[in-house]
Image: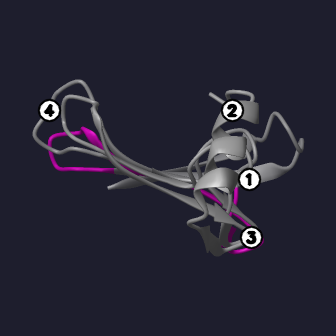
Amino acid sequence: MKKEEKYIDRVSNKELNRIVYYYDNNIIGKEVYIFNNEYHREDGPAIISYYTHTIKNTICSKYYYNNGKLHNESGPAYVWYLDDEEVLEKKYYINGKCITDKLRITIIETSYIKKE
């Protein structure tokens, strides 16, 4: 089952489509935010997926998108969690390009303002 609703981005003030997908047991499986048919959200992750075997909607992964491209200037653009919310993997992207340079990652990590 899915539920679609309007969502106003707190940073850009744009009206986004928020789509929430539910599993049969009515637990949220995934949330996605769409603007102009592309993943997009400026005040948080554009895709959030949840583990199915937990009752409390434990987050499995977060993806930050801006206009359809993985992008986050204030932290990782992709974060994958273990089901105890420990970070298993994170990757950094700016405008869809993967950032692997440790100095740039350090600058991103130390200069960010938490979005959530």
Q: Residues within 10 Å of mark 2 (few under 14, many from 20)?
A: few
The stretch of residues the image draws in magenta is 22-40
Position in image of residue 104 (x %, y %): 69, 54
Check disc 2 and report the residue beneath it: 110
Q: Residue at x 40, y 55 (%)?
A: 2
Position in image of residue 8 (x %, y %): 78, 40
Work out whether residue 90 or residue 61 is closer to the camera in this orientation and state it.
Answer: 90
CB under 8 Å between callouts 3 and 2? no
Work out whether residue 107 or residue 87 is closer to the camera in this orientation and state it.
Answer: 107
Asked which secondary structure carries label 4, the reply is loop
Q: Residues within 10 Å of mark 4 (few under 14, many from 20)?
A: few
Front: mark 2 or 4: 2
Q: Amino acid at mark 2?
A: Thr
Q: Earlier in the sequence, mark 3 or mark 2?
A: 3
Residue 102 picture quarter: bottom right
Q: CA distance from mark 1 to mark 4?
A: 28 Å
Front: mark 2 or 1: 2
Q: Earlier in the sequence, mark 2 or mark 1?
A: 1
Check disc 1 and report the residue beneath it: 16
Check disc 4 and report the residue beneath it: 54
Whether residue 98 appears in magenta in the rendering, the answer is no
Horizontal side of residue 64 vs 66, given as left or right:
left
Whether residue 23 appears in magenta in the rendering, the answer is yes
Q: Amino acid at mark 3?
A: Asn
